Amino acid sequence: MKLNTMKANLDKLRESYLRYLKIYIELQNPDGKLIRTFLDSWFAYKMKGNFLTKNNIPRWFNKLNTNKLSDAEKDCLLKMNFISKNALEAIYHKSDTYLMKDHSVPVKIIHKLLQSDLSRSEKNIEEFLNKYYRLGVLTKAEDIRLNDIKLKSDMPQDWDGNDVFARYKKAGIVRATSTMPF
């Protein structure tokens, strides 16, 4: 398959997930697992490259042991929207640390916000996702910290509706300032 054709097909797959989301929102589907699949697949097809397997299937990133990261997994983790300082150190030092992919604005909140306007167009949905769909890379301990302060699937009560990394700030999770090796 020619590169341009394959790229166009991946764009069509990204667009198909926007259509799925539009239908899902219009029908007010309560299935939280389904929306997670649609959101994560949309993102993978948007990002392309190592976010897809060699068969162009989205990669999932959870409970990754830094000692066993493939080059493709490492590449993707370093391209996420937020990576904690501890997660970055674990990646480069190959400690026996488990990493978690985390939606900085939890899927439950994205779901609720999307369903606040049932007439969204696919273009509007993508604009919304470009603002609120952000992935973080955290250590398992940082993920537990979010859970301990009751922010695993919620935003802080004083959330301004704009700062997509507010949960991490509230939990004291420090963002890595660079993705360069230490």
Image (cartoon, rainbow, N blue to C red):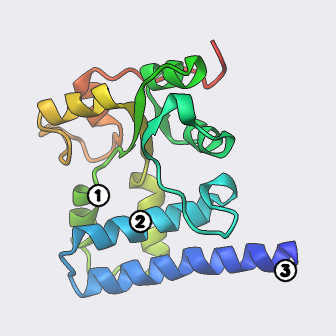
Q: Secondary structure at mark 1?
A: helix
Residue 90 or 136: which is nearer the viewer? 90
Residue 67 or 102: which is nearer the viewer? 67
Callout count: 3
Q: Secondary structure at mark 3?
A: loop
Instruction: Name the residue beneath numbered marker 3.
Output: 1
Instruction: Name the residue beneath numbered marker 1.
Output: 107
Which residue type does callout 1 highlight? Val
Discs 2, 1 touching: Cβ within 8 Å: yes
Return the disc, 2 or 1, that comes first in the chain's sequence. Answer: 2
Which residue type does callout 2 highlight? Leu
Q: Vertical placement of 93 versus 128: above or below?
A: above
Q: Vertical placement of 44 versus 93: above or below?
A: below
Quadrant of the frame with the N terminus: bottom right
The quarter of the picture where residue 107 lies is bottom left
Which residue type does callout 3 highlight? Met
